[in-house]
Image (cartoon, helix red, strand yellow):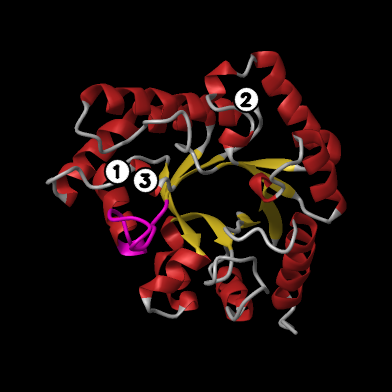
Amino acid sequence: MKYAVCNETFQDWDWSRTCDHVAELGYAGIEVAPFTLASDVRTISCANRELVGKAARRAGLEVVGLHWLLVSPKGLSVTSDDDEVRAETSDYLAALADFCADIGGHILVLGSPAQRRLPSGGTAELAACRLQQCLAKALDRAQIHGITLCLEPLPLPEADFVLSLREAVDLIARFGHPALRTIFDVKSASSEGIPLPNLIREFSPWIGHFHANDANRRGPGFGETDFVPILQALHDVKYEGYISIEVFDYSPDPTTIARDGLAYLRRCEAGKPG
């Protein structure tokens, strides 16, 4: 299996140092939160985009893609009542697809719960219509670049729209775009009340990416979530993408999270989590 880690884990580190260290720890890939590189990726020049990609490749890493897409610029929303806000959000998502391609990535993970809230007084149906309109340009751009955009289910109270894998897959079928899939995030899927291996097997045709974390929001191996059956399920469905460690609790420190999380996943892959 291929393992990656999200760069925002190394919160105060510059990009080149992060890439070098991640490679030294034994990872094959790195996933990027674009706000860590610039508040607006459109301000990153072609030359600097090339440097971002080169730093990863020089370290021996593949850039997996982008996540936390709409943290910045401020005020973006795919479900806003404001037509101009939605138009700007649509433009920025397309720009993120271009940026992802420029640095060598192939995955865009759309979580961003604060930027996809149900409209005030509106319905999930209205939100779905607006989401589809906002994604249209980015999906077409992603398809040109060979990028997959993954619509991420996020549970209550973190989000109030697209809460489960079933809801995400229903929207994927409705939108009918070949560049659109979903992501399996262990922390989020743990809220569904169904054994995680069962969810993986049920939704495997639509899973384009995988985030490894514990139900407690820490890294794999830092809580009670057993990854042995999870990784076995991924093996059984012939998942070929990256398993990317994403945490929301940055304790005790970046190196420990990344080093011990990877070691734990490798033990689980071998059937020995202890």
Type of residue at label 3? Answer: Ala
Q: Amino acid at mark 1?
A: Gly
Q: Secondary structure at mark 3?
A: helix
Residue beneath the point at 57% across and 69% down = 234
Task: Quickly name the residue at label 1.
Answer: 176
Q: CA distance from mark 3 to mark 1?
A: 25 Å
Which is nearer the eye, 126 or 143?
A: 126
The stretch of residues the image draws in magenta is 152-166
Give the label, 3 or 1, closer to the camera. Answer: 3
Which numbered tag is attached to residue 114?
3
What amino acid is labelled 2 in the image? Answer: Asp
Disc 1 to disc 2, how far (Cα)? 26 Å
Residue 214, quarter of picture: bottom right
Q: Secondary structure at mark 1?
A: loop
Q: What type of secondary structure mainly makes up the magenta span?
A: loop
Question: Is residue 55 rendered to the left or right of residue 87?
Answer: right
